[in-house]
Image (cartoon, rainbow, N blue to C red):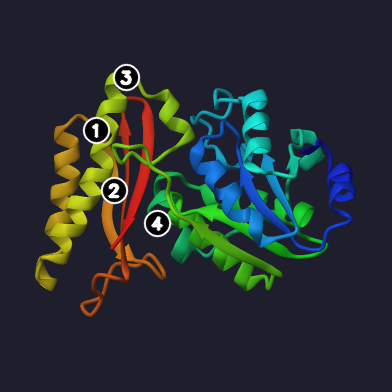
Amino acid sequence: MIIARSIADLRQALAPHRRPAFVPTMGNLHEGHLALVRQAKPLGDVTVASIFVNRLQFLPHEDFDSYPRTWEADCAQLQAAGCDVLFAPRENDLYPEPQAFKVHPDPLLADMLEGHFRPGFFIGVSTVVMKLFACVLGQTGGTAVFGKKDYQQLMVIRQMVRQFALPIDIVAGETSRAADGLALSSRNGYLTPEERQEAVALSEALRQLARQWAGSAPGERAAPELQAVEALRARGWQPDYLTVRRRDNLQPPEVQDGPGTLVALGAARLGSTRLIDNLEF
């Protein structure tokens, strides 16, 4: 596996190739990331992953400085998963000057849900992804693989690629889960042993929400969402949202929408750790 620490080194490594398949990450890798790398492997003639903890997508009170950096373990896991090139720029390589030009996604998609509770988050995400695309895929186009666990992020990136007419195929990877159903996340490492046992309640709440929503009359569909929030709160969580939305645009469902077109999404804090999850149904 080639490790490129600068954009020049990356482009030299990719020069012989015509169609990279790319998996961007912030490191602290788990099986979910590695599954995306393996999914990307047959989609291009070179498999590229990146590790970059992006300051632009962290709010001032969030965990940028304490976000886990596990460099040696990440490199070993990526190599074992079949990654050919690891792009791991230093901050001053990717942002050699203050990033004054930024990508502002469509507020109708980006200012709800995660964007409501983390203002500016998707500006930071879109800006770094656009820059990583320029570095990795800008000369040839190619494929990028993103996990469905970050469902709204996946939709924002798809819309960005479409509206900028980028020659990039966005491929979605299914959410990887632990045996008890907890969605794998780098932030799961913040959980205490007791919190880790409790954490599966979020995915269970989303399954319950989907069942109740599907069985409700059109005029009664707000009740399952309120019940889901209150049930988690009663267990000691601090929910931001548990809601049902349309898969295609994350807007509230219309009367004719039914199972097969919907997704239940949730975000809640357990102790000091904020977890997100979703369930298509």
Give the residue number, with chain letter if any, for mark 3: 193
Distance from Cα at disc 3 to Cα at disc 1: 16 Å
Q: For the residues carrying marks 4 and 3, which lies nearer the camera in this image? A: 3
| Three-letter residue code for mark 2 | Tyr
Q: Nearer the viewer, mark 3 or mark 1?
A: 3
- Residue found at x 45% / y 37%: 185
Disc 4 marks a residue whose amino acid type is: Met
**Picture coordinates of residue 94 (x, y %)?**
77, 42
Report the amino acid beneath label 3. Pro
Cα separation, mark 2 vs mark 1, equals 11 Å
Give the labeled residue for mark 4. Answer: 112
Label 4: state its secondary structure: loop
Residue 217 position within the rendered picture, expressed as x and y whole percent measured from the top left? 9, 71
SS of the residue under disc 1: loop
Drawn side of residue 94 relative to residue 32, left or right = right
Q: Earlier in the sequence, mark 4 or mark 2?
A: 4
Nearest to the eye among marks 3 and 2: give it: 3
The answer to whether the residues at label 2 and label 1 have Cβ atoms under 8 Å apart is: no
* Quarter of the image with the C terminus in it: bottom left
Mark 1 is surrounded, within 10 Å at the Cα level, by few (under 14), some (14 to 19) or many (20 or more) other residues, namely: many
Q: Position of residue 265 (x, y in %)?
A: 32, 53
Q: Which mark is residue 237?
A: 1
Question: To which residue does mark 2 refer?
Answer: 241
How much space separates mark 4 and mark 1, taking CA atoms? 21 Å
Three-letter amino acid code at the position of disc 1? Trp
Query: Is 73 drawn above or below residue 79 in the view shown?
Result: above
Against 18, residue 270 (above or below) is: above
Q: Earlier in the sequence, mark 3 or mark 1?
A: 3
